[in-house]
Amino acid sequence: MVDIEDLREKARETISRDDVRCVFGWKRGTYGYESAPAVVRKPEDADSLIFDATCVQNPASFVVLEEKLPVPRGKEPDTRKIAVFVKGCDSRAVVQHLVENAYLRENIVVLGIPCMGVIDRRKAEKLFGESLEPVEAECSGDKVALNFGGERKEVERSDVLSEKCLRCRYPNPILSDIMLGTEVEKRAEDEFADVSEFEKKSADEKWAFWEEQFSKCVRCYACRNVCPMCYCIDCVVTKLKPQWTRRSTDISENTVYHIQRAWHLAGRCIECMECERVCPMNIPIMTLNRKMTKEVREMFDHEPGVDPEAKPLLASYNPQDPEEYIL
Ligand code: SF4
Ligand code: SF4
Ligand code: SF4
């Protein structure tokens, strides 16, 4: 478990440096099972920082946004470093950003947090209903304790943690400049059981499933906006000249959007599940992303976001690569 005072002190020390412009982390939200993102721009902002099992959001998404902020006319760009707190899965986004040259290693400060899991809001709401008060949550062994304004409830971790945490192989940050707390033990392997189950369906069943799911999509683009790996300034789905995807939310255009996005994330998705978490229509986007991840791992022995020295999948060529997918 991370000592909150130590976390805040590390944030204060970091933002007090002349070469750091901000620190991204988490603060208590105003309601519900998820904390809110926090940005520290002066030492006193660090007083509100927290870390517990409600710190679901991946703050690495903010690093690319901050890095790409437009510079107002007549102003000099802010070249100071961006600091970010990361859990294990969040750190994979930072690693993949570095692999893709989204920013340079010397331009960031990474504060690593060993992690035992985060809450799945939908699971928690099924168990306890919506909460209009902010909930606190701590993992300990096989249990998660939730605190509803003084009332404590304990549940099995599998009943309330995110699916990504139940198969997590990287609970400790893969890279960090400053490490908080002590490393935690990896508790699971990932055999892609969910994908194998889906693969058992016939082609017609798969299409019927996706037709139903894609029909629900309202194209709010929350899944794209929250994704740490969707950071193109000019996204193909909103381009008008040329227009690759129309804006209408019919099954045809929605399917194009989702397939296009899955391909753009092939070999890049770091499985943080943020896209699925924020979807207002509860579309199981990870079913698609995980299938692509499994294919990439099996075909190219490639796993994104785990090796800062790796080359991006689509920028590396191996004569031994399988070619059966080339028509
Ligand atoms: S996937 Fe791993 S690192 Fe990420 S929140 Fe879950 S347990 Fe923590
Ligand atoms: S967040 Fe959900 S509804 Fe919005 S565009 Fe993505 S899949 Fe569609
Ligand atoms: S596609 Fe989803 S799981 Fe993959 S990196 Fe983006 S938000 Fe995370």
Image (cartoon, rainbow, N blue to C red):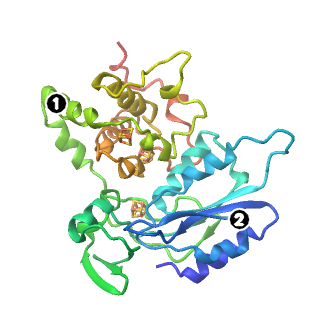
Q: Where's residue 64, x and y in %? A: 62, 46
Give the distance between the C-alpha atoms of the residues marked 1 and 2, in whole angstroms.
49 Å
Q: Residue at x 64, y 40 (%)?
A: 101
The answer to whether residue 62 is left or right of residue 261 is right
Which amino acid type is marked by label 2?
Answer: Arg
The answer to whether residue 117 is left or right of residue 23 is left
The answer to whether residue 126 is left or right of residue 49 is left
Disc 1 beta carbon < 8 A from ligand 2? no
Tell me: residue 179, above or below residue 82: below
Quadrant of res 217:
top left
The answer to whether residue 259 is left or right of residue 93 is left
- Identify residue for label 2: 41
Check disc 2: other Cα within 10 Å, few if <14, some if 14-19, many if 20+: some
Quadrant of res 127:
bottom left
**Which mark is on residue 208?**
1
Name the outermost residue toward the bottom: 150
Q: Where's residue 164, x and y in %? A: 34, 56
The one nearer the camera, 308 or 107, is 107
The one nearer the camera, 261 or 42, is 42
Q: Residue at x 38, y 74 (%)?
A: 133
Tell me: residue 152, above or below residue 78: below
Q: From this viewpoint, is residue 264 visible?
A: yes
Which amino acid type is marked by label 1?
Answer: Ala
Q: From this viewpoint, is residue 316 visible?
A: no
